[in-house]
Amino acid sequence: MPATAKVIEQILTRRPHPEQGYRSCLGILRLSDQYTQQRLEAAAQRACVMDAYSYRSIKSMLEKQLDRVPAEKAAAPRPPVVHGNIRGADYYKSPKPPTVQ
């Protein structure tokens, strides 16, 4: 279960104090009581691809059976939205103040 181990490692290292992640890690391990280890590992692999290292993310994936969808399809980048009402970054730039000479 290398992906599950990576998720647990990431949870512990991303917290200011590793002790803050213990309950999340125990919850992830406890999910194997309700779901098979293969499904838990698939959800963990998907979490690694999506950079979603949390108990909530993995539990949600398992509940919605997203672990059965290949992670490559889920993480496919979407093209930017092009629409007449969407303003670009230039719209939000403040105009330059006049220079005093």
Image (cartoon, grey):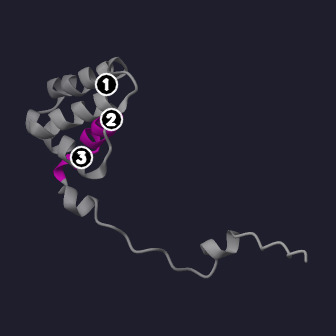
Above or below, 44 against 11 in this view is: below
- As measured in the structure, the alpha-carbon distance from the residue carrying label 2 to the one carrying label 1 is 7 Å
Q: Position of residue 6 (x, y in %)?
A: 19, 37
Classify residue 95 as left or right of residue 56: right
* Disc 3 target residue: 48
Determine whether the residue tagged by mark 3 lies in a helix, strand or loop.
helix
- The residue sitting at the bottom extreme is 84
Disc number at residue 24?
1
Q: Position of residue 13 (x, y in %)?
A: 30, 31
Specify the quadrant that holds the N terminus.
top left
Which contiguous range is marked in magenta? 56-68
Which numbered disc, 3 or 1, marks the residue that appears first in the sequence? 1
Label 2, residues with CA under 10 Å away: few <14, some 14-19, many ≥20: some
Which numbered disc, 2 or 1, marks the residue that appears first in the sequence? 1
- Residue visible at 28% across and 65% down? 76
- Residue visible at 27% across and 23% down? 27
Determine whether the residue tagged by mark 1 lies in a helix, strand or loop.
helix
